[in-house]
Amino acid sequence: MIKQSQYRDNDTWLLDLSASGIQRDRALVELRAILLSGLRAALRGWVHASGREFGELCEDFVQEALVQILDKLETFKGLSRFTTWAHKICIRIALSELRRKRWQDSSLDEHMEQGDTMPDTKTPEPDAGMQSSMSMTWLMTAMQEELSEKQMAALTLVALKGVPLEVAAERLGTNRNALYKLIHDARLRLKARMARDGMTMGDLGHG
Amino acid sequence: MSPGMPSPEQMMGMIAATTEDEIDCGQAFELMHQYADLVDSGQDAAALLPTVRKHIEICKDCRQELEALLLAIHAGD
């Protein structure tokens, strides 16, 4: 059974937020407080969670979320608590912006320059063993031989260098969904190559 | 390789686990609130919504958003 921790149930939220005047205003005030409380808890690992700047940042995100929530109200299908759906929208807005800010000063172009679209295999980690070295060699060869330039750039940025999807998508002139699909296609190609090369999970130390 | 990034073996494990029927971030987002409420209420979200489970295992960005969402809804419990 899903808990409904606030006094409003889903139908009441939808009714009140779709109304006008004081009925809607009261619901908005309550929803704003719920989102703000949730966002403050959710962002503790992302930003220094004290001081005026943190509060202002959260308020800006919540304000933007409220606009989107009201816009999308008719798309809520009731498959969760209304407030969970609303938190989801707020979290997406906040993390997208924080990721952009975190990476805005990082020159991804350097990663994209020719010769640096692949992980550095010339200087293995000091504790990297023979298995790791062989895996890296296979991975590098397979990526070079199986993937398009765009797939290689995407996989390298996101999977190997840890660049967030939205940030990488922006730099590659695409969007998050399309980039995920591009990387998914790349993984499928590499998986097929693994099969052709007769590699098993045991070869990876998982078997 | 950047610190904290997957090892070649982890990367290859991820490649080996790739399936044709994975959902993308947009599809995962459409189900994320449902998944979070199932987790929050102690139900077996992974069994009930296996495509979301699979996606968040692979997609770091969506996994971060789910973790943040769970923190947010716990704040109101």
Image (tube, coloured by chain):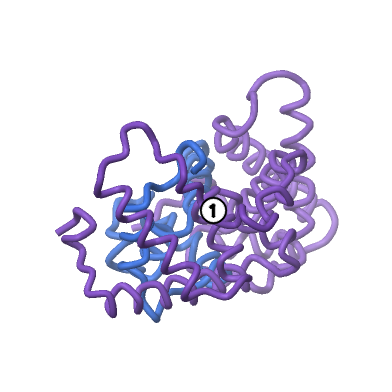
Chain colours: A purple, B blue
Residue at image position (72%, 41%) is: A106
Residue B34, percent across and down? 45, 63
Going by the image, does A62 lie left or right of B65?
Answer: right
Name the residue: 27% across, 66% down. B47
- At which x and y percent is residue A49? 63, 24
Q: Residues within 10 Å of mark 1 (few under 14, many from 20)?
A: many
Q: Residue furthest top?
A: A51
Left or right: where A139 falls relative to A111:
left
Against A198, residue B63 (above or below) is above
Q: How many marks?
A: 1
User: The residue marked by circle 1 belongs to what chain?
Assistant: B
Drawn side of residue A192 relative to residue A183, left or right = left
- Vertical order, A47 against A141 (above or below): above
Q: Position of residue B64 (x, y in %)?
A: 51, 47
Query: What's the residue type where badge 1 is placed?
Result: Asp
Residue at x-position 83% and y-position 61%: A20
Q: Where residue B10 sits in the image (x, y, percent)?
A: 34, 52
A19 sits to left or right of B66: right
Q: Residue at x 60, y 57 (%)?
A: A117
Question: Which of the two residues, B42 or A14, is positioned nearer the viewer here?
Answer: B42
Mark 1, residue position? B61
Screen quadrant of the N terminus of chain A = bottom left
Secondary structure at numbered mark 1:
helix
Location of residue A189 with respect to A23 vertically, above or below = below
Q: Pick the quarter of the image with the C terminus of chain A.
A: bottom left
Q: Quadrant of residue A170?
A: bottom right
